[in-house]
Every structure is written in structure tokens, then in C-alpha cells.
Image (cartoon, rainbow, N blue to C red):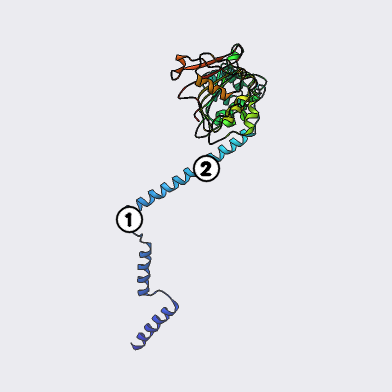
Amino acid sequence: MRSSRVRHTTSQAARRRVGTPGPTTDAHMLAQTRSSQRKPSVNHRATAPLEAFETRVALNEMKLKVARWIQSCFRTLRKSFRRLPLATQNSAFLRVPQELIDHIVDFLWDNAVTLTRCCFVCHPWRLAARYHLRRYEHLTVRSRTDLTEYGRVLQLNRNTPLFTNKRRLRDYKIEIIDDHRRPFAHLFPIFMRGSDVTGASKLSINQVDWTSIQPHDQFFRCLSSYTNITSLHLCHCRFHSASHLYRTVDALPSLTYLKLSDITILRPLVIGLLPHSAMELDCHGATTECSTSAQRLFRSSPPLTGIDDPVATIPGAKVMFNTPSTHLELTMEEGLFHS
């Protein structure tokens, strides 16, 4: 009996050394296996917002990638289109029926700026836009962008007058309306050469303020290229000194008609600064004050003579100086020449 107990004890010790499963170790290992196979409890209410957030983040990343891809495509297309030359009628690029192009451009008949942009698309579009631009008798420039585009179009169509109608060639007018936020009138003759605007005979410059920004000498040199301008109208303009006004008028070699409306000069006028021989004026129906202002503006021979007229003393009345070939018109609106 004692020997059997010793054998059982030694067998258990041997099993523990060797690692063979015994009755106690089997139950313990089975419990561990069942506990490891058992799935942990998941709180679905807590994980639902997290999954939605991760989904939104993934969608935003996808949208950002798509937007970047579209931007890269547009950049590539823009670079490729810039390198392409203007298409001609015989080329295979943008072959659209001329009737369809004419129909599209017909809707832009009252927008000269957009018509000038159509001239840079291709040759068929240029022909369709030129048809409407020739009807324009009054070219208005209101911004630096308009000035640049008109200058490019006029230079491109230098041989063929773009804005001129042969029947009304003498009535063609260019109007410059300066922008006080981004002034551009001091660059007008530099960007739009007079040699490219051969059909214009009238020039109007409005809302110029040269008290802070003064024109460069190149302005007056380029302005002298407008050899066909016979009429000049300066309206609501401010000059730092009278020399700018004198040089502007003197730069136009063929000028025969001058109209001044609401002109402000900070520095006093200098008599006889501009000897303009073409302006030999006779004063009819003008007051003495108006004659004195005109004498200060030009040194004319024979001198101006004033004739008192009750009508001319009314505010806003127009006073005309007539000669057989040239005349000067001064409008006394809010006082002429503020010194």
C-alpha cells in the first residue's frame, strides 16, 4: 500500500517535469482556451459616430484629390492652348461652321469688349466680330483692361480699319473715361497707338485727375501720332499745372476744335506758354471773363475780343469762338479754371 502511494506521487512529479497534461492542468488549459475564444463585448452605440467620422474624412480626402486632379488638368490645358497659334480657315483645329459662329457672335453686338476678345479666338471668329465692330462709331474705354484689349485688337487689324464705317468715317469718336481707383488715361496713347486708329477724328478725355499722377513725356510723344484728330473735348479734368493742359492740346497737330468743360488747374495759368498758331480765334457772343480765360489759354494773333452778351452770363451757358476754319468752345460749368 505504501509502495503504491509512492509510485503515484513520483508519477505526478514526473508528469509535471515532462509537461504531460494531468487532470488539473487539462481543466485549467481548457478554461483558458474557452476564455480566449470568447469574443469581447462591443459597444455599437460608441463606435457608430467614430465610423461616420472616418467615412466623412475619407470622402473629404477623395474630394480633395479629385479637385487637385481637375486643377492640374486645367493647368495642362491652359498651357497647351497658349502654345497653339491662331487657327486659320484651312486648319483642322476648331472647325465650326461659319454660320454657327456668326449666330453666336450676333448676341454680342452691343458689347464691344467681348467682341474684341472674340477676335483672338481664331480667324472665323475674328471675321464675325469685325462685322459688328465696324458699326461702332463711338469707342469707349473705361478701364485698363479695355485699353489693353482694344490696343491689341487695333494692332492686330492695323491694315484693315476695325472700328470705322466708311460712310461715317468723319464722325468716329474715341472716349476715354478714367478710373479714379486705377488710373489709366496717362497710358492711353502708349497702349493704343494713333497709327493703329486711323479712322478716328474726335477724342474725348473725361474725369482725368493729374494732380497726384502726372503723365510721362512719352504720353505727349505718343499723343502726337494721332494726326487725324481734329476735335478734342476735355471734361471734368483736374491738372496740377497749366503746362499739362497746354502740352495735351499742342500734341495734336491737326486739332481745329477744342471744348473744355469743368477744368480745374491748381497752379495759376501762365500767359503765352503755348503759342498755338493754328488757333487764331475771333470771339463772338462771349463775356470779358471768358475772353480773358481764353487769352490765358492761348496766345493768339489777333488777340481775342470780348463782346458782352447777357445770355453768356447764365450758369452753364456755352460760349463759342468761331473762325472760318477753327473754333474754340468753352463751357462755363461751375466756373472755368479754378486757380
Is residue 338 at least partly visible in the picture?
Answer: yes
Instruction: Estimate how packed mark 2 is, as few (under 14), some (14 to 19) or many (20 or more) residues with alpha carbons within 10 Å.
Output: few
Dot 2 or dot 1: first in sequence order is: 1
Q: Residue at x 61, y 20 (%)?
A: 300
Report the residue marked by disc 2: 68
Task: Give the label on residue 43, or none.
Answer: 1
Amino acid beneath label 2: Arg
Q: Residue at x 53, y 22 (%)?
A: 292
Of 101 and 313, nearer the camera is 313
Amino acid beneath label 1: Asn
Instruction: Estimate how packed mark 1 is, as few (under 14), some (14 to 19) or many (20 or more) residues with alpha carbons within 10 Å.
Output: few
Q: Secondary structure at mark 2?
A: helix
Of 55 and 182, nearer the camera is 182
Is residue 92 at least partly visible in the picture?
Answer: no
Q: Secondary structure at mark 1?
A: loop
Q: How many marks?
A: 2
Q: Residue at x 67, y 20 (%)?
A: 159
Q: Where does the image place residue 144, in percent across and percent down from the top left? A: 55, 31
User: If the image is split into quadrants, where does the N terminus sit?
Assistant: bottom left
Q: Where does the image place residue 251, in percent across and percent down from the top left? A: 63, 25
Of 117 and 136, nearer the camera is 136
Task: Give the label on residue 52, or none.
Answer: none
- Is residue 264 found left or right of 41 in the rendered image? right
Mark 2 and mark 1 in contact? Answer it, CB < 8 Å: no
Q: Quadrant of residue 150?
A: top right
